[in-house]
Amino acid sequence: MEESLFDEMKRYVAFDDEDAANLQALGKALEPAFPEIAERFYQRVSAHPAAAAILTEARADGTQFKRAVQRWMEGFFVGPYDSEHVRQVSLIGKAHVRVRLPQQYMITAMNVVRTELTQAAYHLGQPDPARAVLSLNKILDLELAVMLDSYRETYSHQVRQTERQRMERRLEEVSHLANVGELAASLAHEIKNPLAGISGAIQVIGSVLEPDDPRREIISEILSQIDRLDRTARDLLIYARPKPPSRTPKNLGKVIERTVKFLRQGPALHDIPIRCRGLDCGASARIDESQIEQVISNLVLNAAHACEEGGEVSISLWANRDNRYIEIADTGCGMTRESVERAFEPFFTTKVKGTGLGLAICKRIVEAHNGRITIDSVEGKGTQVRIQLLG
Ligand code: ADP
Ligand code: MG
């Protein structure tokens, strides 16, 4: 606090030379009792569980504490009330931030000091103790004002600094991740072409084998592994180089219908019943059609995969005034709690042939549409994945 502000406050509480003289006299009379008052103050503070815990945590040693209290009393009884005095009192506010003493304790502790000193003043048997106590009240409030001010300043400085450090760390993380992501994407890109070449060559070799040649099985295994690598590389590219969605209003029921029709042509959904609800509700949203198709397709494939041992998949669409909801539910194997927690992490998979990128991609796409995606699942019962999009 600036000295000028302190002077201003002195004027506010009408602290004048007479007060200073009263305090000088009172201080002189009380001085022999300072150690005792400091001791009692220390006892009161340590008897309070929360305040005592803070003292212990700060490893505040009792002797030092009492000496500091005594020095402070000497300071405000004697003056002078100049910039050096303000600086000393500010240090107390600062120290309280350092030991993480909540601000309210400064106010309550001041009350303890005030009571102790007032009682002591009345016990001295001097003429007109009330006048001295008035001056005492003025200075204690001034001291408190300075402490609170320096507390606030130190505290907000500390908060800003922690916030800045947190931001800096986060930035570092993000740029590190961006580098790793870019590297992964380049690698995936590099892998895709030779993979296509290898796959072609293996197919040529396979095609000249007799139908009952046992090596056909090996060829088919190689092709399935190549296919898996190719899918990983493709998903990685989609994940690591996300395109900003190019959004236009679309009828969501139609988009879902087309996606499911396309998926049904593949082998994954062959024997699994799929039920659709609400696709004709007319709900539309501003979406990047091919990205949302990708989301639905990833989710339906996951649901179908969960139903391989039995179960069915249902896709529902509904809307209210502001939001559109798409839910892909299945009565398949369900997920453990840990899987639900980690499901959106890139590369988290429990499948032998999984890439672990399907849900990570879904989340990225849905969030790029300012939407939300959530999973509810009960192990052994089934899973519901819900997407909420703005209309
Ligand atoms: P992948 O399908 O390649 O494993 P995903 O990101 O799509 O990767 O899914 C991650 C994991 O979440 C899956 O391996 C699976 O354990 C779990 N999961 C996702 N959807 C379902 C579902 N409908 N039912 C049960 N488990 C699921
Ligand atoms: Mg998947």
Image (spheres, grey):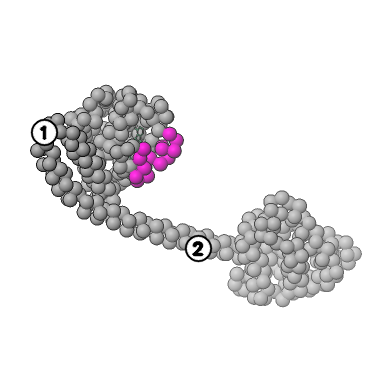
Q: Is residue 347 magenta?
A: yes
| Label 1 Cα neighbours within 10 Å, binned few <14 / some 14-19 / many ≥20 | few
**Residue under the image location 64 percent in, 68 percent down:** 90
| Label 2 Cα neighbours within 10 Å, binned few <14 / some 14-19 / many ≥20 | few
Quarter of the figure with residue 359: top left
Q: Position of residue 9 (x, y in %)?
A: 65, 67
Q: Position of residue 389 (x, y in %)?
A: 31, 39
From what the image shows, is residue 307 above or below residue 104? above
The quarter of the image holding the N terminus is: bottom right
From what the image shows, is residue 278 above or below residue 115? above
Q: Please state which of residues 268 and 158 is positioned toward the viewer in this rendering.
A: 268
**Residue under the image location 54 percent in, 62 percent down:** 158
Range of residues picked out in magenta:
336-350
**Ligand 1 contact, mark 1 (Cβ < 8 Å):** no
Residue that label 1 marks: 210
Residue at the far right: name it.
Answer: 125
Q: Position of residue 77 (x, y in %)?
A: 76, 71
Residue 161 marker: 2
Asked whether residue 372 is in view, the answer is no
**Residue under the image location 46 percent in, 62 percent down:** 164
